[in-house]
Amino acid sequence: MKPATRPRLLPAALCLLAFLAAVPAGAQEFQPYPQPKITPEQFARYADEVLQAFGYSTEILKDQKLIAFSDERSRTFYVFTTKDHPAHPAWITRQMVEEDGQVRVKQIGYFAGNEEAFSRLFREFQGRNKQLMEDVARRNQ
């Protein structure tokens, strides 16, 4: 997976906060498969779909061995592992949603590689989501 454009170097948290003001619209399917365990072909197909739709937003997170894409309209981030990541091939999708007047982050993930490494990655992003929500709550006080 090669980025189509020069990578943006904005911190992910700032991007997510900016998406709070965006109006959701139809986008890439959030949950394309019923189970988190997928095939390498499914990984490649979905990664290509996301690259085609959101390549303009490519952010290479070299030190984390990840490539991120974002869709401002639906407030969604797609984070794919690179070949040198222990969980590869895998991805995490995160979406900012408002429910009952509260903002939260929905998260889903898929893996065709090492399940244990994927589980660690998934939990890491859950921690980031919690930190993001705490930051949002502090700013809204």
Image (spheres, helix red, strand yellow):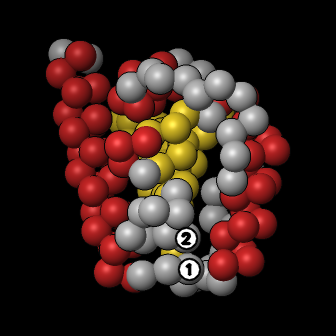
- Image height check: is 73 above or below 81? above
Q: Is residue 42 left or right of residue 107?
A: right
Q: Residues within 10 Å of mark 2 (few under 14, many from 20)?
A: many
Q: Residue at point 18% right, 21% down? A: 138
Q: Mark 2 or mark 1: which comes first in sequence? A: 2
Q: Residue at point 59% right, 28% down? A: 7
In front of the other: 65 or 105: 65
Q: Is residue 41 left or right of residue 61?
A: right
* Label drawn at residue 112: 1
Secondary structure under the numbered disc 1 in the rendered image: loop
Q: Which residue is mark 2?
A: 89
The amino acid marked with disc number 2 is Pro
Res 5 visible = yes
- Image height check: is 26 above or below 108? above
Res 27 visible = no
Secondary structure under the numbered disc 2 in the rendered image: loop
Quarter-of-image position of residue 132 = top left
> Tags 2 and 1 in contact by the CB under 8 Å rule?
yes
In front of the other: 92 or 95: 92
